[in-house]
Image: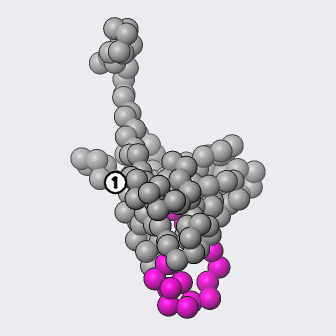
Amino acid sequence: MEVLLADGTRLPADVVVVGVGVRPETALAETAGLDVADGVVVDEHLRTGDPRIHAIGDCARFPDPAGTGSLRLESVQNATDQGKYVAAFLMGADAPGYTAVPWFWTDQYAAKLQIAGLTTGHDRCETDGDPASGRFSVRCYQGGKLLGVESVNR
């Protein structure tokens, strides 16, 4: 197998991974005069600069609970969790800021991939199970802190 680059270069490859993302639709927020930066900017309660307007899901750029800046997550679970959080907040729940652990999953043919947490910046990994068997998990740490777990068919 090989990969053909736009300039005509051919690179040999055993495996090719393609990451596809989306651009958040922010036109309505921009028209409303809200802050936009690769998503609609919200605070820890998912409120925009206008406290009467919340944004959730793929378009919301919210403070990272780990304190590393802000992030925007493209996942159904994130949109569901944020929707539940905002509903409770609007109903008067005395809740701290949004802190749900990101969780992702996908089925790719016979493989089920599940990820809990965000593993960017890890400095150590530990594997449970046998990758050759197609059933394993990888725990990712930064220092002594568990950042997340990535699992295939487990």
Residue 104 location, x and y as percent?
43, 58
* Residue 68 appears in the rendering: yes
Residue that extends furthest to the right in the rendered view of this protein: 143
Task: From the top left corner, tell me how far across and down residue 52 is, in percent.
Answer: 52, 77
Between 29 and 40, the residue placed more toward the observer is: 29
Q: Label 1: how many residues lie within 10 Å, few (<14), some (14-19) or many (20+)?
A: few
Q: Residue at x 63, y 61 (%)?
A: 63
Q: What's the magenta region?
A: 85-102
The residue under label 1 is 106
Please identify the quarter of the rendering in which residue 44 is found: bottom right
Name the residue type under label 1: Thr
Residue 105, image x, y percentages? 38, 57
Q: Is residue 104 shown to the viewer in this render?
A: no
Front in this rendered view, residue 64 or 23: 23
Image location (x, y in percent) of residue 94: 62, 88
Q: Is residue 88 magenta?
A: yes
Residue 3, located in which quarter of the rendered image?
A: top left
Q: Residue at x 75, y 51 (%)?
A: 143
Q: Where is 89 relative to 79, above or below? A: below
Taking depth in this image into account, of 124 and 97 the one nearest to the observer is 97
Q: Residue at x 40, y 38 (%)?
A: 19
Identify the residue shown where x is 40% and y is 71%.
Answer: 80
Relative to residue 27, is residue 126 drawn left or right?
right
